[in-house]
Amino acid sequence: MKQSFHLSVFLFFLIMITVGSPAIEAGSLEHPKIVYLDLDGCEVCDIIKNHGVLAGLEDQGIEIVVYDVVRNPLIADKYAQAYGVRGGRAAPIIFAGDVYFRGAETIIEAFESGEIAMHAQHPLRDIENYQVREFSFITGLLFVILAGLLDGINPCAIAMLLMFISMMGVTKKTKLLLVVTISYISAIFVTYFVIGVGFLTVLGLSRAAFGNISFYLYGFFFLLTTGLALLTLYDFWVTRKNRYDKVKNQLPRFIRAFNRRLMDKLTKAIDEDRVFKVFWLVAIPVVIGVLVGITEAACTGQIYIAVLASLEANVTGRTLGVLQLFYLFVFNLMFITPLIIIALIAIYTKNTISIANFVRQHLFLIKFLTALFFILMALYFLLLTLDSPWVQFEFSL
């Protein structure tokens, strides 16, 4: 009986010692490990390094695996999504155990309190089998095609084109008119493509370097597309009643006046015999196209900016990848396609008034489709702002 009692006491203390011992705590690691998302040229990342956080963790025997968010975007995205990081991949972030720490202030505070070292004793979340849900290449392509065509029938773009053709219509030479019109439309294409590349690059760098502001960026796009949806719905209502004078979402009057004066001066020069050289036939319409493209961007760029923001949020890759450039090219090609068709009709029929009247009669439909696009994009950016799993997708080949 005594032996049984002593054995029971021994087993009791053995269990207590085992449960209370941190050295054999369930889930602890023999070799602690963390993952650190870094970015070259990131000032916030330099603050962490200069504070000695990484060196200090290594001195504690913690292995640090470093990934650059630009050089290793897919891995960075997998960690960000596996840990539910709001706004996606960013730098600097430390993943330790089942938690993450983002931002210089948070990381330094967690390091000094020993919180990072404590969580590093536990396994990281497994991302090896973590599959990023993807939109197919065809889905992405279909999206940019439809959006580009919708933007191409924008009344602002069509109005500027018809104005240009009308001013060039004084010449009786159809071939000449074709050359200058193609030059004009090509210049708009290049201008918008360059604008898109610049905007997409800025968005990509912002998310990579300041991932914690992605929440605010997507929130801004939500407010922007919501406002545009309401404004376009109002325009749909007034155009449905043929109250075209009440349309709000259009180019400001002073920009339209500026474009008219610009076209008037340059198109007159083309109609003079002294500038009937190939260089001038191309150069002058290109200048007009570039300037008009920039000035009318406030109107035609509304759909464009929503598409660019959604592409940046959903394409896995470097700051500016081949797939993004391809989608950008396709969007702008679709944007000028309606302009090319309208230009050919106007040139060969010598009648821009009928085309303008046709567009005006169907303006309510254009406004309705545009409003619907903005509503869908506003919903998308809202879900993205809330970090909803419904929008955790990537476009891929």
Image: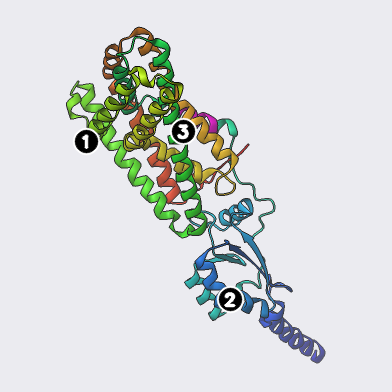
Q: Based on the displayed image, in which of its 4 quarters is residue 263 positioned? A: top left
Residue 120, visible in the rendered structure: yes
Q: Nearer the viewer, mark 2 or mark 3?
A: 3
Q: Amino acid at mark 1?
A: Phe
**Residue 87 shows up from this direction:** no
Residue 349 image offset from top left, x and y in percent: 35, 7
In the rendered structure, find residue 53 and report the number of the disc placed on it.
2
Residue at the outermost top position: 349
* Marked residue nearer the N-terminal end (2 or 3): 2
| Magenta highlight range | 140-146
Where is the N terminus found, in terms of image quarters?
bottom right
Helix, strand or loop for disc 2: helix
- The residue wearing badge 1 is 254
Rounded to the nearest whole Å, what is the CA distance between mark 2 and mark 1? 56 Å
Quick check: is 144 in the magenta stretch? yes
Mark identifier at residue 190: 3
